[in-house]
Amino acid sequence: MTTGEPEPHRLPGPKGFRENLRLTRAMFQDPVPVLDECARRYGATFGLGAGPVRMVVVGEPRHLSALSAQPNSSFRWGHWANVLGFIVGPTSLIVSDGDEHHRRRAAVQPAFARRRLDGWVPMIVSETDRMIDVHLHPALAGGGSVDVYPLGKDLVLAITVKAFFGNGLEDRTTEIGEIFEELQAYLELPALRQIPHRLPFTRRARVRATRLSFDRIVDQEIARRRSAAAGSPHGAPGETGDLLDVFVDGSARLSGEEIHDQVNSLIGAGYNTTAATLAWTVQRALATPGVWAQLRSEADLVFGPVDQRPKGSGTIQDLTYAAAVVHESLRLHPAGAIAPRQAITDVPIGDHLIRKGSLILWSPYLSGRDPDTWDQPLEFRPERHLDPAPDTVAAMDAAWVPFGKGPRRCIGFALAQMELTLILARLAQRLDVNLVRSEIPPPQGMVVNRPRGGVPVYAAR
């Protein structure tokens, strides 16, 4: 029996169980090479799977737009393949669905108000200066090389801890970093080594205990603030400007578990991903002739003398070239090459139909390299984001999705972009360095896409 409507086209993809099994296993260990291989053979949207695992990788911008037009009720984020759930907790925004996601997001959103972000500009620049003075300059003065990636991770962590906790946990920054390093290392294990279980004395058990130790740190800080509030003549602590105050505010109506999970997921998601993007951005800016010099010229105009601290919102708005460099780096090297969701209804995309139950791997990596959207897509050209032709703006917006799109867009995207722009501009203003290796390194990482071998630099002669 027919309805008069054309049948949806079958998604392109590998044929045969063995080939699907090979690519599926590789996708869950090191996705970027699989994305490159399959995009060459089948296009940027393709089907993949072996046995009960059915996946659809969606990387064509028009198909991404079709997905974002679907109601959230068509998808589930708290699905079997979202291994982040074990780390971030069951009430995290990352794994929440439906009304609960909407309620939690509404409670967290005020933490990222523009006024609050602008207030962190001087702190971000100050922390960047501290990293340069204490670590980079001394290491470079000896004539050797230094890897920007781990130093960038330490810098982003310091900024993140201050943004979340003010100065309340500054003395525990190293301890917090060690906790998140252990959690991240577990997430990077192959999927078969992350099979859920409750057995004691295993790595999963140790990671569970590590996560609980971070919850205790957060609880201690909340208790300290509430104790201070109880002793205050007004019954409330002073405005700190940090994120934790927003979460513990009674108007947010977040439970203790929800506070734990939001703080954990926002730090975990923002810390490693921002550090990886910073590494890619520095590498690309130094490897592309003229970019570092132009960044320095702009920073000199915006920041003024090195000992002068920016005052706030105007600073970030004036760093237009630095923002374009960050934009271009995120296009080519999004921190997450794929982002999973599960279809809980049949979902149409163009001439295809994604069947209910399929795992959808949304790919900003593939859309950022779409040759129909980006002229010479593999070239690093920040200028393409400065003044695009009006007829290309919509296409570029549809294809540039490193933070996702729509109501599930990464809630901390504005903070991440602001951090990256300010740090990059300050590094370019204060450092005269060259790359140890100019070739683009291969990516590394299942959950966070970072440059293999880091970004070693040496002082320019």
Image: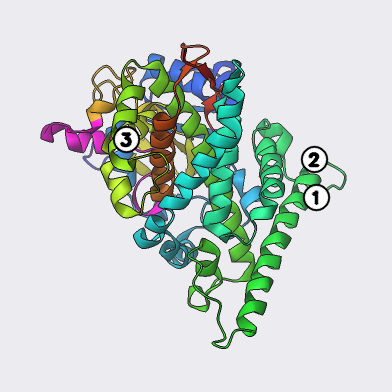
Which residue is most to the right? 201
The residue beneath circle 2 is 203
Q: Quadrant of residue 177?
A: top right
**Marks 3 and 1, the one that precedes in the sequence:** 1
**Marks 2 and 3, the one that precedes in the sequence:** 2
Q: What label does residue 170 carry, if any?
A: none
For the N terminus, the quadrant is top left
Q: Position of residue 340 (x, y in %)?
A: 49, 40
Amino acid at pointer 3: Asp
Q: Is residue 397 magenta?
A: yes
Q: Position of residue 17 (x, y in %)?
A: 57, 20
Residue 359 visible, this angle:
no
**Marks 1 and 2, the one that precedes in the sequence:** 1
**CA distance separating discs 1 and 2:** 11 Å
Q: Which residues are magenta?
A: 385-410
Q: What label does residue 198 carry, if any?
A: 1
Mark 3 residue element = helix
Which of 272 and 233 lies nearest the eye of the viewer?
233
**Relative to 431, is 22 on the left or the right?**
right
**CA distance separating discs 3 and 1:** 56 Å
Which of 458 and 44 lies nearest the eye of the viewer?
458
Q: Residues within 10 Å of mark 3 (few under 14, many from 20)?
A: some
* Marks 1, 2: nearer the viewer: 2
Amino acid at pointer 1: Arg
Mark 1 residue element = loop
The residue beneath circle 3 is 300
